[in-house]
Amino acid sequence: WAHARQLREMEDAETREDTRRGKLVHAEHRQEGVVPWRVYGRYIAAMGVALCLSVEVILLMGQACWVASDWWLAMWARSDTQSDWKWVWVYGLLVGLVLSLATPRSGLFFWAAVRAATSLHDAMAIRVMRAPMSFFH
């Protein structure tokens, strides 16, 4: 954090110096490091906490069904009675469950991500439109 603060202070000093010289466009600097947790929090808030939890639950359910089908297949491979139809039926049901969850899972995730992105974009656009003219110079 100290490094980011120091970088901002240097950028501010450079910007003030450029402004004093009459320069209108300033060089931009990019920030390096990890994404702060507050960014994730804002994204979740833009998505809606209930929707975010729903996405998490359906993603976990889909993954659990995938793991269960792999586990069942491993048990079937180790079984002495591999020709028993119960293995086929249970494996078929698990694969069917994986496939039936795949479309709603990806659809809900996509819809939630677009909803959050739209909300963040709209908030940003409103702030830019309400910014004073000095912001653009």
Image: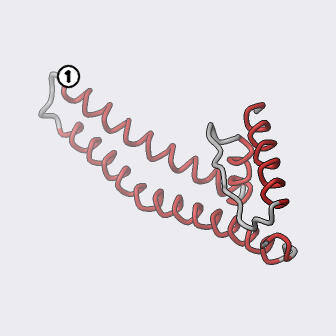
Q: Say few, some or many: other residues with alpha carbon within 10 Å of mark 1 (under 14 / 14 to 19 / 20 or more).
A: few
Which x, y percent locates residue 19?
82, 61
Q: Nearer the viewer, residue 67 or 11?
A: 11
Residue in the foreground of this view, choosing between 110 and 22: 22
Q: Please, what secondary structure does the residue beneath circle 1 have?
A: helix
Q: Quadrant of residue 64?
A: top left
Image quadrant where one finds the N terminus: top right
Counting from the top left corner in percent of width and height, residue 45 is at: 74, 55
Q: What residue is rendered at 34% in x and 45% in y?
A: 94
For the rendered model, the colour scheme is secondary structure
Can you say whether 58 is above or below 86 in the image? below
Residue at the spot 22% in from the left edge and 30% down from the top edge: 76
Amino acid type at mark 1:
Arg
Along the horizontal axis of the image, is 109 left or right of 13?
Answer: left
Residue 46 appears in which quarter of the rendering? bottom right
Q: Name the quadrant containing residue 116.
A: bottom right
Is 117 positioned to the left or the right of 132 in the image?
A: left
The residue that label 1 is drawn on is 78
Whether 73 is drawn above or below 28: the answer is: above
Measured from the top left, where is residue 20 in percent x and y? 85, 59
Residue 21 image point, x, y percent: 80, 61
The residue drawn where x is 70% and y is 48% is 39
